[in-house]
Amino acid sequence: MNSSKYIHSIICAALIATPCMAQSDSKGAKVVIPAPIEENTWEYSISPYLWLSGIDGTSGIHGQEVDVDIPLDDAIDMLDFAGYLAFKAQKGKWGYYADFQYLKLSGSQATPIGFLADKLTVDLEQFTSEAGVKYSLYQTDKTLVQIMAGAQYTYFSVDAKAKGRISASIGDSEDWIDPTIGLTLIHKFNEKWNLHLTGQVGGFGVASDSAWMAMGGVGYTINDCWRAILGYRHQYIDYEKGDFLYDINVGGPMLGVVYEF
């Protein structure tokens, strides 16, 4: 190869490697070489949220079953602490997610046997965490459908104390892990408003006999990084082991914000 052809090859290679560089051909016309397409990058979101939930169902410890009926207004009065946080990451069609919930309630009431024990105090504590992977089944500029598969860890404890002429206490705690699968739909109505729907089932007899969760909400885009979500979430778990029973519905409105980066 002579020197002129060698120099010409170097110049051509440099032009191809330079993104979106405009050059002129021999007739003076500009030739634009497009930049190479960048590979997909990770996108993250973190979502603190508030879930105002009532509780109903049946709880059993040491063979004693108790009907649980705590409406939303009573749950707020009994609330000691609650914290909720969700995290998501996405790259191309694949991603992963995590969700953390902690709830602590306590309350007291007069007993029907006041001559022995005039007050009954109950403390409830629950921690739930879930993590898994997700895959995009369908995606357009406005609609996204994803399938999810993961595992959910649940810890629940109850402690009841009777005080009066005689004092007695009873309590128990249990934790377990359930497999879960589900679907999520996100649809954008316009640049500001969007719809979020999630349905999930789990347990399958591995730990819980059955478990499911349904959530729906409307989101509003504040700016490029922040969104607000208002919706409703209902969660049910039916778990039994020995003399411990947790057959509980938890449901109520939720409000949260999403930070994307």
Image (cartoon, rainbow, N blue to C red):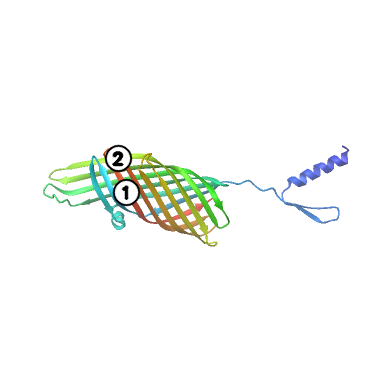
Q: Amino acid at mark 2?
A: Ser
Q: Which is more foreground, mark 1 or mark 2?
A: 1
Residues at discs 1 and 2 in contact (Cβ within 8 Å): no
Q: Residue at 83% of width from left, 53% of height from top?
A: 25
Element under disc 2: strand
Per the image, the residue denoted by label 1 is 248
Q: Nearer the viewer, residue 130 or 136?
A: 136
In percent of width and height, residue 117 lies at 14, 47
Q: Determine whether, in the image, residue 250 is placed left or right of residue 149.
A: left
Q: Determine whether, in the image, residue 65 is placed left or right of residue 25.
A: left
Q: How many marks?
A: 2
Q: Nearer the viewer, residue 23 or 196?
A: 196
| Label disc, if present, on residue 173 of the rendered structure | 2
Q: Quadrant of the N terminus?
A: top right
Q: Residue at 44% of width from left, 58% of height from top?
A: 217
In percent of width and height, residue 70 lies at 28, 54
Q: Residue at 79% of width from left, 55% of height from top?
A: 30
Q: Amino acid at mark 1?
A: Ile
